Image: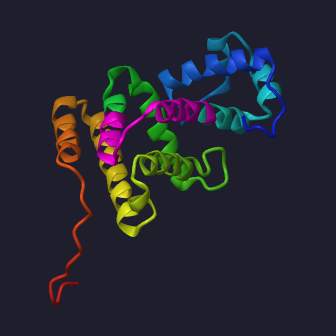
Amino acid sequence: MNSTEPTPSPRQVELLEAAYRYALEHGLADLSLRPLAAAVGSSPRVLLYLFGSKDGLIRALLERARADELDMLARVRAADLDTAALSVWEWLAAEEHRALLTLWVEGYARSLVDATGPWAEFAEATVRDWLSLLAGAQSDDERDTPVGEARRTRALAVLRGGLLDLLATGDADRVGAAVRGHFAAGGGPPPALTVSPGAS
């Protein structure tokens, strides 16, 4: 819930946290109010009253998931981009965060095809969050340059790709070795794109 909305009641906070735990286990794509309400000790009518609609509840759950993400990002303190990216990866790779990250990926993917519903802008906001963290780990001289922007965009692409692979396969050793190897080697500017003559 954003700062322009009324302060939630203790009951609303309690039910949101219970619903969030439920969503971490069951996901959001096929969320049904009746089994959710039964699991959290409430009723569909109460949930609709407190959150306005099913979409309102899903929006609140996505904001709750993003709050966990922002809390993680706020804890990262690093002197350079590669160290910051490695710190983020260690958090992403931890087994105890799989449910949250699966929920995050679900929200990210759904927001790409739902421009008006509760998922709207979730992916874009998440990209901005991560890029902001990575920018904060860059030097003043690099941060606002095209090369600096390209470096943090590439770092985000590596982290996101590694995360998707990890969630799909569970192969933490293989994926972790690739991600750590990339950032441990240091990230210079990405190579210039070259196209062979006659390429289509």
The x, y position of residue 17, in whole percent, is 63, 19
Q: From this view, report whether residue 44 is shown above or below residue 142.
A: above
Q: Which residue is depicted at the point 39% across and 53% down?
A: 139
* Residue 151 placement, left or right of 38: left
The chosen color scheme is: rainbow
> Along the line of sight, which residue is nearer the eye, 182 or 160?
182
Q: From this view, report whether residue 48 is shown above or below residue 121.
A: above
* Residue 160 placement, left or right of 72: left
Residue 88, magenta (yes or no): yes
Report the span colored magenta.
Answer: 63-89
The x, y position of residue 49, in whole percent, is 83, 26
Residue 35 visible in the shown view: no
Main SS, magenta region, reads helix
Residue 91 visible in the shown view: yes
Which quadrant, please, contains the N terminus?
A: top right
Q: Which residue is depicted at the point 73% across and 38% down?
A: 2
Q: From this view, report whether residue 174 is shown above or below residue 42.
A: below
Q: What is the tally of numbered marks visible in this picture?
A: 0
Q: Which quadrant of the figure has residue 116?
A: bottom right
Q: Which residue is depicted at the point 24% across and 59% down?
A: 188
* Residue 184 placement, left or right of 69: left
Residue 196, magenta (yes or no): no
Q: Which residue is depicted at the point 70% across and 39% down?
A: 55
Q: Residue furthest top?
A: 41
